Each structure stands twice: as C-alpha cells, then as structure tokens.
Image: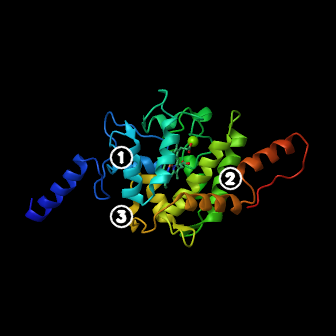
Amino acid sequence: MNPTSFVAAAILLAGLVRGQGSVEYWHPPTKGDVRGPCPMLNSLANHGFLPHSGKGIKLNDTVHALEAALNINQDIATSLFGFAATTNPEPNATEFSLENLGRHNVLEHDASLSRADFDVTGDSVSFNRAAYDETRKYWTSDSITVKQAAVARLARYNTSQTTNPKYTMSPLGDRFSAGESAAYLFILGDISTATAPRKFVEYLFLNERLPTAVGWKKSSHVFTPTDLVTAIDLIYNATGASAEDLQKMRARSRRGEVHGGSLRY
Ligand code: HEM
Ligand SMILES: [Mg+2]
C-alpha cells in the first residue's frame, strides 16, 4: 500500500471505529447484522453512519447519521427516533433495531413502494421486485416530479386494496407513506424544484447505498420539520386529496353511498 492510500485507509478506519461512517465506506450486511424496510436507514447502516449491525440504535446515533449523511436537522431526527423507539417491543425503549422497524402495522404499513404487503407474502421487509417495478413505472422522466411520486404512491395503494384482503392503512401509516415519498424526492433531489434525478432514487432502492457513484452529493440545505411538512403537503396536494380520504371515499363508493372517488392522475 502506498503512503497516500495508507493514510486514507487509516482515516477511514478511525471514522468507522468511532462509529461515524462515511460515504466512501460501504459494506453490505454480514452474518448477525439486521436490516429493515427503510432503504435509507439500511443504506446508512451499510455506510457505518448508523451501527453496521443495525442493532441498538440510540437517539444520538440517529441524530448523528441523519445530520452527517443527509443534513437533516436534529428536530426531525429526534421526532423520527421517537417513532422508531415505539417499534421496539420493550416498554419505554431508548433504542431500536432496523429489524424492529419491520413490525407490521406499527410504522411498517401496506402499499410500500418497494416491499410487498405482509399479509400477501409474509415478508414486508425485503426488497420486492414486483412492487418496485410498479412504482418505477410512474417515474417516466429523468427527473422525478412530485406528481409522478404522488401517483406512484397511490398506484401502490390501489394495488394493495385490490390484491390484499387484509389491507389496512392507519392515519399514521398514511402520513409515513406520504413522508417516505416526500423524503426520497427532497433528500435525494432538489428542494427548490421539488424534483429528484431518477438515477439517484433508483440507485438507493436497488443498492441500499448513497448514490454518490451516480453524482449525488449531500445537500447544503439543512432539512427542517417545516421542509418535511411542506414536502408531505406537496405529495398530498399533487393527487387532490390525502390517500386516507381517497380510501374512505372508495369504501363509501363500494357501499353505494357515493359515486366516484377516482384518483386524479
Ligand atoms: C430515523 C429515521 C427514519 C425512520 C425511523 C424510518 C422508518 C421507516 C420505516 C418503518 C419504513 C417502512 C414503511 C413501509 O414502507 O412499510 C420506511 C420506509 C421508507 N423510508 Fe424511512 N425512516 C427514516 C428515515 C428515512 C430517511 C431520512 C429517508 C430519506 C430518503 C427515508 C426514506 C424512506 C423511503 C423512501 C421509504 C419507503 C420504502 C418503500 O416504500 O418501499 N427514510 N422508513
Ligand atoms: Mg410496508
């Protein structure tokens, strides 16, 4: 090893030993490591921004990872950590694992973009090609727009409702779902134009790795709760109503109470 690469390796290793992670370091999970249904948290564990094991993730790990890798502010990270801790079956937990996040109908919900429904395949955690292919069908340009993201999300809702007899979506699940579509668009894309390069988004989903190899860079914009609320509203507004409202509308329509309830594609 030449002196320059030795120094680079030493710096990288020092970072990993401190549990800091880096965009350069990336290693898929190995025996004993756990991963879950969130492609971004899986990626952050693969990069070492979160514990590579995917286990024992604490508030300070979450704040560090989201800030260091993605420039997401501490308020968002703290709030998401609070939700994540509820997936740990231990009462009053102060940590969670990526595996915990897969517990069905806590945060994990039906109609995911790249995962199957739990009651259909028994696995709502691993990447599912058919689900993902349906989602990406709606990403029809090199730059994914809010409208495309919103329509892709509702298409997955439609599929779940028609193929999963046990389909459920709580208000929290629906909000998370909208937040997830907002997140890939805004964290990987450009918050000012509300678009994301399709190649960045595809790279993340397919490789569970930050898409630096295809040109992504951490945004210089610090993401705040206000950004998140704005982004979620854009997703909801792009389809005319919240998916929850549309679901209720369809249920009433099935009972013959109203006609219509079609999605505004
Ligand atoms: C502590 C922070 C976070 C927590 C606790 C969390 C939790 C989750 C959970 C439980 C799911 C599964 C929902 C489902 O599809 O059933 C999920 C999915 C997802 N998350 Fe995260 N997440 C976090 C941060 C992020 C960030 C920063 C991004 C940025 C891009 C992100 C992007 C996504 C996307 C795109 C999905 C949808 C995957 C799919 O539908 O197949 N998440 N997240
Ligand atoms: Mg799911």
Report which quarter residue 146 is drawn in.
bottom right
- Residue drawn at the location 43% of the way across and 67% of the way down: 219
Which numbered mark, 1 or 2, is in the foreground of this view?
1
Label 3 SS: helix
Residue lying at the far top in this picture: please name it: 90
Is residue 38 among the parts visible in the rendering? no
Q: Which residue is mark 2?
A: 154
Between discs 1 and 2, the one toward the N terminus: 1
**Is residue 183 left or right of 243 when viewed as pictured?**
left
Quarter of the N terminus within the rendering: bottom left
- Residue drawn at the location 33% of the way across and 51% of the way down: 47
- In 3D space, how far apart are the residues under numbered discs 3 and 2 (Cα atoms)? 30 Å
Between discs 3 and 2, the one toward the N terminus: 2
Which amino acid lies under the numbered mark 3 shown in the image of this protein?
Ala
Which amino acid lies under the numbered mark 2 shown in the image of this protein?
Leu
Q: Which residue is mark 3?
A: 213
- Residue drawn at the location 72% of the way across and 47% of the way down: 244
Between discs 3 and 1, the one toward the N terminus: 1
Provide residue 140's location: percent of width, then percent of height.
60, 66
- Residue drawn at the location 81% of the way across and 42% of the way down: 251
